[in-house]
Amino acid sequence: MDQPNTSPSQRRWVFVMEPERCIDCEACMISCSVENEAPLGKHRNWIDKIEKGAYPLLSTTFLPENCQHCSNPPCERVCPTGATYRREDGLVLIDYDKCIGCKYCMMACPYDARFVNEEKKAVDKCTFCVHRLDAGLPPACVETCIGHARHYGDINDPNSDVSKLLARYPSYRLYEEAGTEPAIYYIYSNRVIE
Amino acid sequence: MLDEKTDEQNGSRGLSRRQFLRWVGAGAAASVLASSGLGLLRPLSAEAAVKAARARRTAAPPTQFDREVATLCEMCVWRCGVRAKVKDERIYKLEGNPFHPHSRGMLCPRGQAGVATAYDPDRLKYPLIRSGPRGSGKWRRLSWNEALDYVAAQMLAIKNQYGAEAMIFSTTHNLVQTQFENMLHAYGTPNYGTQRSLCYNAMITANLLTFGLEEPGRDYSQTQYIIYTGRNMLDCISNSESQDAVSAIARGAKVVVLEPRFTKTAAKATEWLPIRPGTDLAFHLALIQVIIEQGLYDADFVNQYTVGFEDLKQATRTYTPEWAASKCEIPAETIRRIAVEFAQAAPQAFAHPNWRTSNFLNSFQTERAIACLNALVGSWAQPGSLQPVGGEETAGLGDIPQPAFPRVTAARLDGVPWKYPLVPLKLGVFQELRDNILTGQPYQAHGWFVYRQNPAHSLPDRTKTAEAMSKLDFIVTIDVGMNDTAWFSDVVLPEASYLERYDPLTVVDGTVFIRQPAIAPLYESKPGLWIFKELGQRLGLGDWFQYKDEEDYLRQQLAPLDITLEELKAQGYYHLPPTGGGKSKDLLFNTPTGKIELSSKTLADNGFSAVPVWEEPVSNAPDTFYLLSGKVAQHTQCATHNNKLLHERVPENPLWLHTTPAGERGIKDGDEVWIESPVAKVKAVAYVTEKIRPDCVFLTFGFGHVSKALVTAYGQGTSDSILHQSFTDPQSGSQALSQTFVTITKA
């Protein structure tokens, strides 16, 4: 796990996902829900299933997803109250007290990462477990991932896990064409490591 | 603006997660206890909880806790190490213990959801005695003293009137098993029910007869080739082994999956072979045939460490890939190729011994063939091969003094060994035990003591189990929740959840681990160790329970070791001093010949084939389907469906049905369908998919609970056990769960 060794403004937190290692067990979802007390039925993270083919030639790919913490976040631009903001280390966060529940951000997010949290009376989403991050702990989803599919770290630190993974393997991001500069990188499958 | 439906409107009934985790805060819990007369009432403090939650709505979740308790998970039997984060006497979060070899710092979805088992509003809260007919849900609250006195009196009355053998004791693998066994042996009954004949009897007996140990370990670190035969490693998570499997796949190891269904393991595998159910044996016999015929076996290993090679060679001579292809519907060239690949990769290769192998009457032969296949290629005690592991879970710990058990002469109701001579006593034949409660042969049972188990729901042919229970005079169930067996019991005793109690210490890979309370037992629930001692004393069996309390039990276990209970509690683990020996015993086999028995005289002497042999399985008649059952990652057997976090992810179990037969029947995805087996007809919701053989349907097992006290899970999904017929393999005692055939019609 990476510990920050630079000032916040120099850091850029990202996730690197290895879909090949995701087994769709949903431990990340439950860990997140317990950690962040998401209401039952609402989730800050999820797993996309891409199923292809017909019997008996089938394939399924599992994509772990959550808020992409974009460098150019559409949700921030449309927020009329400034509730959604971007921290200097790149995390996109919500000031729940400022949220008026207009849901513009939900409409603007191309990743469908946001939901209404009835209990908070505010829109909610993945915070990158900022409270844990600031305490030196990995996000709850990363910590429990039994497939080691989820990684996190500072992409500006060349020695971080994520930088090493990205240096070694080709990767892609979701909806890059939207210009959102998302902070989740997916390693292409069917590779051999070590 | 915030007009989204609430959870309640969306159909996920009851309290939200936030509410039910919070309501148990001391004040709320007290008010709930005071306001509800019966242990079954649900908490009423939702409004208060919501108010409190809103007040904190901007607060970040805590990162500082009053304590982090190192303990052991019990959401399945893998027993991962857990760190429970506790603040204000509430467990906020469970995380994997990095020091435990089974979790390595990670928990699966069930482990993560453990808080919702502890804080399940439907938990049993007090001892209860039935005040209406069985299953009526009418209960009266008892004090522990009243309840234990009553249970002891009933058990003594049965013993005095009919003999101790009229009492059945059953449980599922757990850490209090030694005390459970003390209770049944000291009481003097031979009737010990376990879940194992519904699970892995075929695998265990086959490995005992071949290698002289129950279950070979697997070293994934360098393996290049794995064959899974129905072992769905990535849905049916065994945390550390599932981690290893994912890493091996990512590393590029070849994984072949024999499975009629496109499981998540199949999705990750190099090669998925949708084999015809019941014919895995033919596939493995053909691998053996090719490997012998082409001389691909490890001749040195076979000569030095096995017996019966010539017998095996003779017996498998005709099991060619072409022959097997006609049975299992996998092309002969594929079988031949896999045989060659597997042998070439060995010994960095293994055919997995699998786990729940209660599928067909020939599953024992399948497991024998797999064991022989591994032996032929020398997959033993090498990096990347099968491993000679085993050993007692309490090795190195102190014993609690106790006298010898009384001699028991009565025959076991489950037919071991008089009908099933090769089935180990500690495995038993559970379905036969149930059947003989009904037949009254060789004698009539009168009482049933059920501990942490749910046979009313798990045994095949559930209707028959209900009839058997109705023949008994007295049933007592001890559990955390009102499971289906408890629902039909006379007395129900609430056990503390695994997060609230001590259990006896356990040893894994030379390290002692502790299950200890993260919080005090909720309500009036009590630890199993306490319950057994109190009940044992009332039965006049106190000598078998010589410990003052749970901590004293653990202190006696620690007596020979250089660590105090306090130190162990703080650290969570203790490395035992090395015992020496190392790998010197790796190639000593605890069989009659001291070698790996490709040919077994024990089997021959009992009238069975000494070498693996083809046994033709039953196959489906036109228009009927094999009814398959299995697991999802989010549930454990029948035990977790009332856990709100897991229920939210997997609330029910739709029937997997292939697109083609669905189309022929006019069934669309999401339609209601009737499933009819020879013993039951039930409704299900169809999941129309390409991911299953067209001649098979599949249900995740454990759903369709009948206990109305499981408010979250009651009536959700479809029971597989009500549809299953009982078939028992005479060799291993294994129930054949995949050879019930069903018809499917649109409802």
Image (spheres, rainbow, N blue to C red):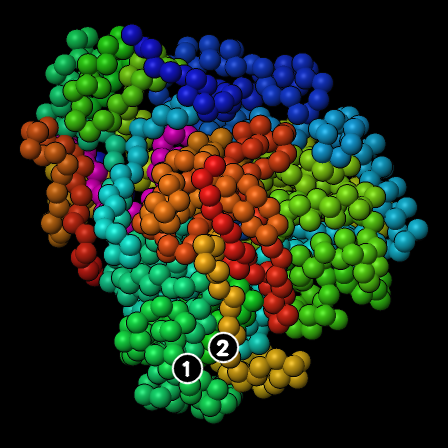
Image quadrant where residue B273 sits: bottom left
Task: Please name whichever residue, B334 or A68, is drawn nearer the observer in this view of the structure.
Answer: B334
Residue segment shown in magenta: A10-34
Task: Write the residue at 72% across / 18% down.
Answer: B37
Check the image and report above or below for B86 versus B736. above
Task: Write the residue at 43% across / 78% down.
Answer: B285
* Disc 1 to disc 2: CB gap under 8 Å: yes
Q: Position of residue B376 (x, y in %)?
A: 41, 82
Q: Is residue A29 magenta?
A: yes
Task: Please name whichever residue, B285 or B251, is drawn nearer the observer in this view of the structure.
Answer: B285
Observer able to see residue B663: yes
Task: Write the residue at 52% across / 11% down.
Answer: B48
Image quadrant where residue B390 sits: bottom right
B149 sits left or right of B278 in the view: right
* Residue under numbered circle 1: B319
B413 sits left or right of A84 in the view: right
A172 sits left or right of B489 in the view: left
**How many C-alpha atoms fall within 10 Å of the one at disc 2: few (<14), some, or many (≥20)?**
some
Chain of the residue displaying label 2: B
Specify the amino acid type for callout 2: Trp
Observer able to see residue B63: no
Specify the amino acid type for callout 1: Tyr
Task: Write the residue at 54% across / 26% down.
Answer: B89
Task: Please name whichever residue, B652 or B616, is drawn nearer the observer in this view of the structure.
Answer: B616
Check the image and report above or below for B478 versus B67. below
Check the image and report above or below for B249 versus A95. below
Identify the element where label 1 is drawn: loop
